[in-house]
Amino acid sequence: MLAIVGASGVGKSTLLHIVGGLERPTSGTVHYGDDDLYALSQEALAGFRNKRVGFVFQFHHLLPEFTALENVMMPALVRRMDRELALEAARKVLGQVGLGSRGHHRPGELSGGEQQRVAVARALILEPDVVLADEPTGNLDSHTGEAIHELIKTLNREKKTTFIIVTHNDKLAMRADRVFRMAEGMLTLQ
């Protein structure tokens, strides 16, 4: 688990978007294994994101008209996974984030912490190599934020999934295995 901390506006979120294939860098390259991400076609880049990367944002971006279970299933359905297999995988991962009994609730019927757990489950359903989390607790109260960080740490340990987390919260960042500080466009190991 890696955390990136720094003042607002220094480019932490932009860096995460570039690493995840969401924004093109103005210069340089991003390599994932042997692949230069931005040399890939748009279709191949979209496939990379769907297969290899999970995203958790500060604002969960859940679709309000769908249940928690349906929201979690979305990446699997985009990948054209069989609907029954996607449903089974969604139920499993919702259980892993402590929401096994809340799958049929729509986002508006869930607390902020529950909504963020759904977002974490959605990021994990396809068992990505890495999950990029941009201020995953930024809009939560301190108790709920603490619970989400504990959940992420547990999932990191148990699933062996790499998490890169951008956060303003130094206390929470210190739980990561490595902490980088971003300032003036540079990352330094803290």
Image (tube, rainbow, N blue to C red):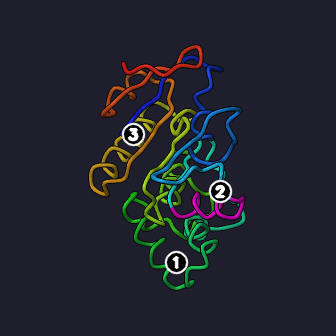
Magenta part of the chain:
41-51
Q: Height in image: 65 above or below 137?
A: below
Q: Where is residue 93 drawn, in percent x and y?
A: 42, 65
- Earlier in the chain: of badge 3 and badge 2, it is 2
Three-letter code for the amino acid on which mark 3 is drawn? His
Q: Residue at image x 56%, y 72%? A: 76
Label 1 neighbourhood size at 10 Å, few (<14), some (14-19), many (20+)? Answer: many
Separation of residues labelled 1 and 3 (CA atoms): 26 Å
Q: Quadrant of residue 74?
A: bottom right
Q: Which residue is mark 1?
A: 86
Question: Comparing marks 3 and 2, which lies closer to the viewer?
Answer: 2
Q: Nearer the viewer, residue 136 or 95?
A: 136
- Do the residues under discs 3 and 2 have CB atoms within 8 angstroms? no
Q: Residue at image x 64%, y 63%? A: 44
Question: Comparing marks 1 and 2, which lies closer to the viewer?
Answer: 2
Label 2 neighbourhood size at 10 Å, few (<14), some (14-19), many (20+)? Answer: few
Q: Which residue is mark 2?
A: 40
- Earlier in the chain: of badge 1 and badge 2, it is 2
Q: Where is residue 80 drawn, in percent x and y?
A: 61, 79
- Do the residues under discs 1 and 2 have CB atoms within 8 angstroms? no
Q: Residue at image x 60%, y 50%? A: 37
Q: Residue at image x 55%, y 69%? A: 69
Q: Secondary structure at mark 1?
A: helix
Label 3 neighbourhood size at 10 Å, few (<14), some (14-19), many (20+)? Answer: some
Q: Which residue is mark 3?
A: 149
